[in-house]
Image (tube, rainbow, N blue to C red):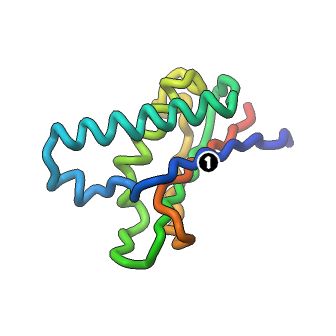
Amino acid sequence: MAERRRWVIHRAGERPINTNAERQGNRYKRATATAQWRSDFALLARAQNIPKLDQVRFIIVPHYKTRQSLPDVGSCSPSAKAGIDGIVDAGVLVDDTPAYVVEHVYRPPVVDGWDGLELIIEEVPQ
């Protein structure tokens, strides 16, 4: 069996956008925040020189400074989606359709002293 290559991208500095906040917020502020997350992940992916991949699995891990107001497991999906779009923008994937992304795995929030999102890109061998 072929070994699975993995890359880890950390986007730190602020709490991931959660679905409740996204639903309640101003659409212009939401668009600005989403564009920033997307741009940041594109930049981070390019910095790691991740090669073009055929198929991947994403493991999504939200990080929080404290246990205060911890969201549920999948609530960071707006930030995760923006991050994945940024990885596509960086040329790592042709698109984020099921032909290229076989799975999204959401891990429970980690409380470890920093706010942000970790996207683990795991290559799916052909």
SS at mark 1?
strand
Q: Say which of 126 and 66 sits in front.
A: 66
Residue 115 lies, in percent from the top left, at 47, 61
Quadrant that contains the C terminus:
top right
Q: Looking at the image, which is closer to me, 5 or 43?
A: 43
Q: Give the side of residue 66 with respect to residue 125, left or right.
A: left
Q: Is residue 21 above or below residue 91?
A: below
Q: Position of residue 42 (x, y in %)?
A: 51, 31
Q: Residue at x 43, y 66 (%)?
A: 73
- The answer to whether 74 is drawn above or below residue 43 in the figure is below
Q: Are there few (<14), some (14-19), or many (20+) residues within 10 Å of tag 1?
A: some
Count of numbered labels shown in the rendering: 1
Viewport quadrant of the N terminus: top right
**Could you say which quadrant of the image residue 113 lies in?**
bottom right
The picture places residue 102, in percent across and down from the top left corner, at 56, 40
Q: Which residue is drawn at 38% across and 51% down?
A: 77
Q: Which residue is drawn at 50% across and 37% down?
A: 41
Find disc 1 in the rendering and name its residue: 120
Q: What residue type is labelled 1?
A: Ile
Question: Residue 5 falls in which quadrant of the image?
Answer: top right
Residue shown at 30%/42% (left/top)?
33
Q: In the image, 71: left or right of 27?
A: right
Image position of 16 with respect to 93: above or below: below
Is 26 placed left or right of 125 in the picture?
Answer: left
